[in-house]
Amino acid sequence: MNIFKRAETTRFAVLVLLASASSAALADRPMPWRELTVPAADNSQQHHLEKTAAGELILSWVEVDGRASTAKFAVLEKSGWSLPLTVTREDGKLADPPVVLGLSDGSLAAAWMPYPKESADRYAADIYLARSIDGGLSWSAPLKPYGEAARIYDAQMSLAALPGARLALVWTDMRFASHAPDADKKANRYQLMSTVVAKEWQASPERILDNDVCSCCRSYTAALGERLLTVYRDHAAGEIRDISAVRWQPANATPQIGGVHADGWVIGGCPSNGPSVDLAPTNAVVAWFSAADGKGRVKAAFSHDGGETFRAPIELDADASGYANAVLLEDGSALVSWRGRQGPDDELRVARLGEDGKISRRTTLYRGGFPKWPSKYLATQVIGNQAYVAWTDPALKRVRLAVVELN
């Protein structure tokens, strides 16, 4: 070989090795982050993150005082946190974290789940909705957006804002499927239900999205225009509980259900570990937990047809507790947060995942204990070049919030 060609080949090989080492170092290098002080008081829990119509972060939470639960929220404005405001105060516990989110006309919607005062069913809950046109200073009278036949399963609701200041609501219902024959009614006990609330704050007739779902894994709903995508843990014959996605629209009478991936997790009870989804004009991402082979794994899968089909899953963690969140970023990658395991503790882990399956950056935000239901999930939102991740710290007994720099 010519000495000059040999030198050029050697230099090329060195550059490839340097590039590979640089990529590996980048993946191992944690993303810069800091903790942000939140306006929640001590004994705060049941955190949730949403956005206003203007793209500002909304943090909602519950403050516990004796047997009373007060649902509050604050908005992270350019000058800092707004004054915390109260949505509702209820006797006893709230079944699920309260949600405050922005509607397209600039108003706010709130949802919360109290337990009925005199119910014989320990898992029964109510869902109330309210609207504010003055930034949360006052709220409309609470609305129950479903009929008397509903039997709401506690800790199970997801919401998404729609055009025209409307709101989509999804929940798990314990009533039997009305269209199922008597022999099949037992198998259809848990249904995924939905309604759409108009700007005038009137609920549309309830619709069944899936008539046989896993009982207590939280659903997650994302909207893009009139397109809605809800992901959830399904239930199939043989106690198979894998993740499914249903595509639906307010004006479309036939929801389209498809599987995300056939993990084949057979479990004789609900693992209380639901998935997460984010939706963009041309793609979507779902993150979830599975222990089909006895190991707790966190996975994510991308879609390029709005959630109709999903690519092969990408595994982010093979020793995890789950409770995954996924948010799409502008370059098509996704930011995934979840609870991994480290010895006797859990870790709050965050990773940036490319569509090619490669993790470009990762970091650990917290190590320690996590509370049980209903504060055990994480919450994640992305605004500009920053990601916000919220969790409840059981040792400090308060809600915490981290800001991750995506650049």
Image (spheres, helix red, strand yellow):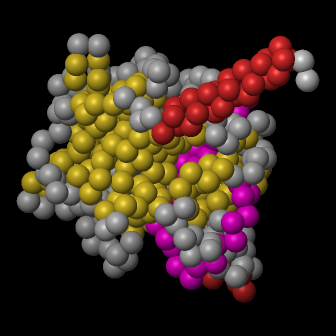
Q: Which residues are magenta?
A: 259-287
Q: Is residue 280 left or right of residue 76?
A: right
Residue shown at 37%/61% (left/top)? Answer: 342
Rendering coords of residue 131 (x, y %) = 37, 33
Q: Residue at x 52, y 66 (%)?
A: 296
Q: Which residue lies most toward the left here?
A: 66
Does residue 281 show up magenta in the picture?
Answer: yes
* Residue 143 image-quadrant placement: top left
Q: Quadrant of residue 354?
A: top right
Residue 162 higher or lower than 324, as above or below: above
In which image quadrant can residue 330 be found?
Answer: top right
Q: Number of numbered discs present?
A: 0
Task: Give the image location of residue 55, x and y in percent.
Answer: 43, 20
Left-right relation of 130 to 302: left
Q: Can residue 2 be seen by looking at this rendering?
A: yes
Percent position of residue 64, x then y:
15, 53
Q: What residue is drawn where x is 31% and y is 68%?
A: 344
> Is any part of residue 148 visible from this angle?
no
List the single residue furthest toward the bottom. 183
60 lies left or right of 338: left
Compared to 77, does 35 lie above or below?
below
